[in-house]
Each structure stands twice: as structure tokens, then as C-alpha cells.
Amino acid sequence: MRRHLKQSGVGIRYGANPDDKSKMEGSAIKVNRSKNGEDFAIRVSNLNFAYLRDPVLRGVGFELEKGAIGLLGPNGSGKTTLLRCLLGQVPLKSGQVKVLGYDMAGQARLARAGLGWMPERGGIIPGMSGVGLVAYLGELSGMPARDAMQRAHEVLHYVGLADERYRKCDDYSQGMKQRLKLAQGLVHDPDWLFLDEPTSGLDPRGRISILELIRDLAWNKGLGVILSTHLLADVEAVCQEILVLKQGELLAREKIDAGSREPRQVFEVEGFGDEEAFLQGLGALGAEIVPDNRLFLVTLDLARLEGGASAPGTDGYDTAAGVNAILAVAAANDYALRRLRRRPVSLADEFYSMVEA
Amino acid sequence: MPVYDRGYTHWEPSAARAWPAWWVIARRGIAEPLKRRWLLMLLLLGWVPAIVKGGIIYFKLKAGDIADLLGGGWTSIEPEGFLSFMEGQRFFVFVFLAIVGAGLVSTDRRDNGLSLYFSRPLGLTSYIGGKSLIVIFYYCLVTLFPVYALCIFAYLIAPEAAGLDLLLLTPLRATVYSLLAGGSISLVLLAFSSMGKRSIFVMVWWTIMVSGTETIGAIAEGLGRESVQAINFLGQYHNAGSLLFSSPPRLDVNPWLSLLIVLAWTAAALLVLRNRIRPVEVVS
């Protein structure tokens, strides 16, 4: 993603009164529920988990700082189980999971005060009104009754259920239920929000609207978000980093930031002039050239180009090196370029290449 | 700034006190059934025996032995009479607990509510404690609270005749009995509730447990096999309660054996709850 997170690693808690400008404009109050004050991270090491005798997670390990993280994987790859391990909902027998500084094997209840959870299936308590349900779960999270009710109204406004908050949640549509589940996950203002297939069963408009809310929370409000889904477009829209699971193993961890992870990049080139000399020049760089109508698709191995091996500030490849190389060859061969752009590599392409490899 | 313009704001805790999770669960669970009008009517019906007994106490204290003609231990204002009264309420105990308790865990299991509960900072003890308190409350509503009311009533109409036993010891015995019996019964009911995802399933099992065992016990007693009364589920509680109320056993079963049976039921219920209540369904 070509965006930068505004958030720092530490959650900022603003005053409850939004009219209090001094609090809103800088002198923020930090309410820190983390045990050691600074540790908002998630640390997982060598996590193995099995339901009965079926292994679901095998040797999973990673560290996450607050941010928008996508958890990708085919069905049955262990995404939901991993989230449940992070919530401490299942007994951890092998490996270590630390969330917000708490060891989830023995201190899960303490950590859960700072965690929000939006389950894929169910997740509403029939017979309750929307606002009643959210306030009830707020109280169960340790909020005083009045605070919980006030927050319930606020978060229901935020997720767009203000007009429906007094209706029984049994009567909600699928989209409204998803919003309600998001609201209950937010009511106690968690540091991390774990979302399990949040757009499941939604129409395109509802999906976009939920994704916008999640994006706002992750990018503007300072919440850490882990989005578990098999919908790659959802992850592309919201996340800055992905974890890919396959058959319970962590297959890859990548930043969704440009296509610079792969050394081989494809460029679309179109121009006029001495075409033969231009193509020979590119061939000298080791490029593979495929005509595509009026275009040439030029595949360059950035690792072989001067300056292409390491992009400044990243551990990937500098795509500018590829562009510069093509420009240099064009200039040297009097070839006027009409079009030169890197063909974007979709997350789907990369995901499937990883999973199917 | 109006709430609809505010967007998402972070929560800063106020100085107000947060209630423990078990109390939050119990409070909601107690309040929810009271919203149903027909249940309130049924509740009133459950108090009719107490009103009748109140009238008898009035006769007893004002008109001497005439009240005894109205019928046996149930009319007595001795401790035994109050145990008999609570025993006589078993129909309402059966009906109320079936209505209130059957769906307490099964509904949460059916709608994946357990996952929501256990994503919060509460443990199994808080969850079971809160749910159990709901059942205990409704149990006491038709057993213990009428006893309190009757004791107070007796004191009001004849303070000199009521005596220390009626004013202090009987309510105390009734309280201890109701809390212990109610607690144990609630755990058994919750265990049934945790074994299914549909309330109707739980109600069927509860009916077999209460009415079925009582009927079998009664038939066996009629055939001269009194020891079979040991399977009478609610009967064991009343029989064991006779130890507390210093009254003759209610069944032809040793009250200590009844106490052991009750303890065994409670332990089994706890074991079931521990295994069945968890945020994740494990399917082999």
C-alpha cells in the first residue's frame, strides 16, 4: 500500500469530552492498560495447536506492532484458531503467545480488557436491543454501567446504527448484524481489534462501508486491527501487512507496499524510433520481452540491475532502478517512449503464487 | 459536539464503579423474564399457596387448634411446616426453572454467544456463577421469599405468640436450605442446558429429571419398594433438608444418603459444565 500509517506504536486516549480542545489538540491523556506501559505488541513464538488430535497450527511465530494486519489463508488454514489463540479462548499447550504484555496461557483475562473480537458466526444475543447488547457487553468488559450505556450509543452512531439501536437485534439484516458485531467489539475501546471475516455475507455496498469503518479505526484512530479473511480485496483495502497461513503454518509475512517484494518486475513499454536497437539494449540487461499489441511487456530482474537490489529503507527491490534502466536504454538508442509503467502485481497474484507453490 | 458528528472517540473511564461480571450476567438474566406479563401472572399464582398458608397461620395464632383441622404438617408454623411448604412448591419450582433456566446456556451455545462472553475479561466461574444466580433467584422467589413473608406476617399478627424460632431460626434455616438446594439445582439445570442447543431439548430432560423420577419413585413406593425413592430428584433435596429443619425424613431414604446423592448430582453437574462451556466448539 502506498500509504503511511498515521499512528505511532502507542495508543492515544483522548478526553471523553470532545469539546475539550486542549485534550483534543495535543495534550492527550494516555490511558494505558498494558502491563508494562509500552507493550502494545503481539508476540507469538513456536505456537502449536490441535483440536483433539488434528493439528491446526504448527510452529507459528511472529511479532506484530500496532497496525492493520491482514490474516490470509485458504479455508481451514487456521486463521480463526490463531485469532482464538490470541484471545486466549483456547488452552495453549505448546508455544507462547503474549498480547499487550500478558502471557495468554495464564493471563488471558487481563489481556482481554484491551482486546475486541468480532466473530464470523453468530455473535449476537437474541432478545436484546442493539444498544442493550452493546452496553451489556461493555459492562462485561469491566465498564461501569453508565459509561457502557453512553459508549454503546456512541459506537452505534459511529457504525451507522443510530436509528436502529432500539430495535431487537434478532430483526437486524445481515449488514446491520455485522455493524452491531463491530460495535460490540469497540465498546470498551480496545487496543487491538480482531475481526473474523467481517464482510462475510454482505452486499458490495455494505462491504465497502464496513471496510471504510475498519480502515478508519486502523489508520486514523490508533487501533491495532487483525483482519482475518479469504477475500484478498478486503485486505488490500485495509491492511498494511499480511500474514499468510497455509495448513497451519505461517507461509509468509509481507508488507502490502508496492510490488517490490519480487525481484522480477514487469514493465509496459510503448514508443517509437529505433525499435530493434532498443530491444537489443534491453536484451543486454537480461530482459525478457513479449509483444502485447502495441506494447512490449518487459520483464526485468531487479537483482541484476545496478542499484536495484535494495530499495532505501526497505529490504525489497527498488523498482525505480528498473524504470531508470529502461529510460537509459531508450535514450541511448534514440527511442522515444510514449508509455513506461510498472505493471502492478495484485495481492491475489502473489497470494495464489505463495499458496499454490 | 452532538454524538452523530463525533465519530469514534476513545473511552476514558469515569470514577463510577464497575460491577463484577457475574453480577452483570445475573442482573440481566433476572430482569429479562420479568418483562413477560404471563410469567408475572404465573409468579402471582406461585404465591397463592403462601397466601393460603398465611390465612392458616392467622387462624392458628388467633383461633388456636381449629387450624390443625385444615390439614397436616403443611399448615404448621413449626420449622417442619415451612419445609413442607417449600416441598409443596415443587410444581412451581419445576415450571419456573424450566422457563427461566432451560435456555440460559443452550441459547448462548446456539447463537455462538459463548464466544462473545469469553472474549471479555471474565472466566468460567463468573459465567456459571452469574447464570446460576438467575436460577437461584427464581427458585427463592417461590420458596424462600414466601417463607420470609409468612414469618413477618406471623410476627405482625401475634408478636407475643410468634416466638424466636419463627422470627429468627426458621428464616435462617430456610435461607441456608434454599441457597444450598437452589445452588445445587441450578447447577444441574445449567448442566442440562449446556448439553443442548435448543431450549425444548433441555425442558424435556428437566421434565424427565423432576416429574419422571418423582413418578417412578411414587409408583415404586406403591409397590412396596421404598428404596427406589432415592431416584426422586427434588425429593432428595427435601429429604436432606429435614436434617437442617430437625424434622422427620420426607422419604423412606436415609437423609444422609439423600445428602450424598445431592452432592453427587452437584459434582456431576460441575464436571459437565466445565467440559461443555467453552468458547470454541470442538467437533471430532
Image: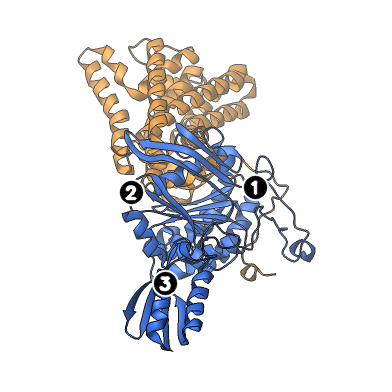
How far across and how far down the image is residue B177, in percent?
A: 50, 22
Q: Amino acid at mark 2?
A: Gly
Q: Chain of mark 1?
A: A
- Disc 2 target residue: A76
Q: Is A249 situated above or below B51?
A: below
* Residue A190, visible in the rendered structure: yes
The answer to whether marks 1 and 3 mark residues whose Cβ atoms lie closer than 8 Å is no
In front here: A183 or A7?
A7
Type of amino acid at the residue the image marks with label 1: Pro
Query: For the residue labelled by badge 3, is the local secondary structure a helix, a strand or a loop?
Result: helix
Q: Image quadrant for the N terminus of chain B?
A: bottom right
Circle 1 packing at 10 Å, graded few (<14), some (14-19), many (20+), is many
Spatial separation of the CA atoms under disc 1 and disc 2: 39 Å
Q: Could you confirm whether marks 2 and 3 are on the same chain?
A: yes
Q: Which is more N-terminal, label 3 or label 2?
A: 2
Q: Is residue B205 left or right of residue B134?
A: left
Which tag is nearer the camera, tag 2 or tag 3? 3
**Residue at mark 1:** A144
Q: Chain of mark 3?
A: A
Q: What color is chain B drawn in?
A: orange
Foreground residue among B103 and B177: B103
Provide the chain ID for the residue under circle 2. A
**Which residue matches tag 3?**
A284
Q: Nearer the viewer, mark 1 or mark 3?
A: 3
